[in-house]
Amino acid sequence: MRSYKIAVLRGDGIGPEIIDEGIKVLEAVSEPEGFELDWIEYPQGADHFLATGELLSEATLKEVAGCAAIYFGCIGDPRLAPGVLEQGILLALRFYFDQYINLRPVKLLEGVRTPLAGKGPADIDISVVRENTEDFYIGIGGRVTGTGAGSTKNTLEILRSLYQVKFELDIETDADELAYQIGVLSRKGCERVMRYAFELAMEREKKLTSVDKANVLTHCYGFWREVFTEVAKAYPDVQTEFNFVDAITMWFVKNPEWYDVVVAPNMFGDIITDLGAMIQGGLGLAPGGNINPEGVSMFEPIHGSAPKYKGKNVSNPIATIWAGALLLANIGEKRASDRVITAIESVLKAGQVRTYDLGGSSKTSAVGDAIAQRIRAPE
């Protein structure tokens, strides 16, 4: 029998309970599909950090490297400053395993209402491919104040020389303060995520939209456009177009049916996928994959840890279950993945089991039970 080791990081807040439901459903589909899932639990999260001072050690990362995939809950805890857990655990995993693709299906399922008037499941079925390791998220930046070697004036001179432009800022006193952030794109980073998007487009409707802001941020995103144009030459059957990020946020709402596959730099992809989550029915229905096609990938819901709902058994686990379906497809169990998504849609369409965010009163565990039962039901 086929067997896969899966690293499980439940994380914080509602993470443990939604992962429970994901595991329940994936176990339900593994048996009839003839494979086993060996869940390897890791305690990383707020409680572990507060107890031990450890975020994510090199030894743990090396252990996880021996797994077929990572199943991740959600991270974040009000006892800690924002960013401590996110950077020390979630981003650490993404960068260590070079998960350079963030894949977000924006699909309206049968039985779910969208806030967009007159739109239905046939209109909203978009795959957003977000670059996941570069752009403004690589951490180059800082804050300076006053005089001396690290002064605002000296920093401005360095930035002026780097960008060869004049900053129209009047920095005169020791009280002045400056913050800056630098976005970086590499040719390799652009090419590989774009190739992935083109290959995905070839499997779907052969239509690909590239997102940028090249009319203002000309250095980074002019380069993005240049690389996209070059990569497109290898895919003459794919229809391509460019959208500015502000325009695509408008058109996602007005005409979502226009889009099939969308590829975007890291920051813009982050923004438009949250919009995508809402047009597909909410964050409780929004899964994501952090993918390295040649390495270890990680699958998670895109919502936060919702600490106020921790332990209440009321949160929607469907995003996590759907992320589990993406995990199954990633490890080669495509039929099992399709069965999970079909079961999710069947339960939603029936409308009897729904959490509060979808207008119902069902418990988290009841949703997992219903989807697992639908999978086990005779076809």
Image (spheres, helix red, strand yellow):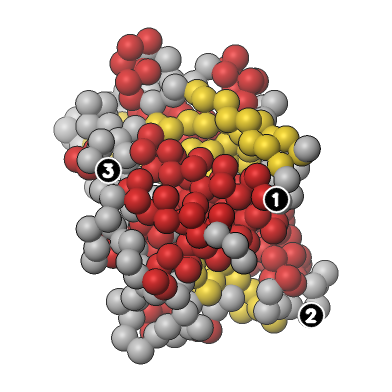
Spatial CA span between label 3 and label 2: 48 Å
Amino acid carrying label 1: it is Glu
The image quadrant of residue 152 is: top left
Spatial CA span between label 2 and label 1: 35 Å
Q: Secondary structure at mark 3?
A: loop
Residue drawn at point x = 57 percent, y = 26 percent? 40
Say which mark, if any, is on residue 33: 1
Q: Nearer the viewer, residue 307 or 293?
A: 307
Q: Which residue is mark 2?
A: 237
The percent coordinates of residue 227 (x first, y second) are 70, 62
Answer yes or no: do the residues labelled 2 and 1 have beta carbons within 8 Å?
Answer: no
- Vertical relation: 275 (above or below) 362: below
Q: Which residue is mark 3?
A: 313
The percent coordinates of residue 281 (x first, y second) are 36, 68
Q: Residues within 10 Å of mark 2 (few under 14, many from 20)?
A: few
Q: Nearer the viewer, residue 316 or 86?
A: 316
The image quadrant of residue 126 is: bottom right
Q: Secondary structure at mark 2?
A: loop
Q: Nearer the viewer, residue 290 or 180?
A: 290
The percent coordinates of residue 64 (x first, y second) are 62, 26
Give the mark nearer the N terminus: 1 vs 3: 1
State the quadrant of the N terminus.
top right
Residue drawn at point x = 39 percent, y = 26 percent? 45
Amino acid carrying label 3: it is Asn
The answer to whether residue 272 is visible is no
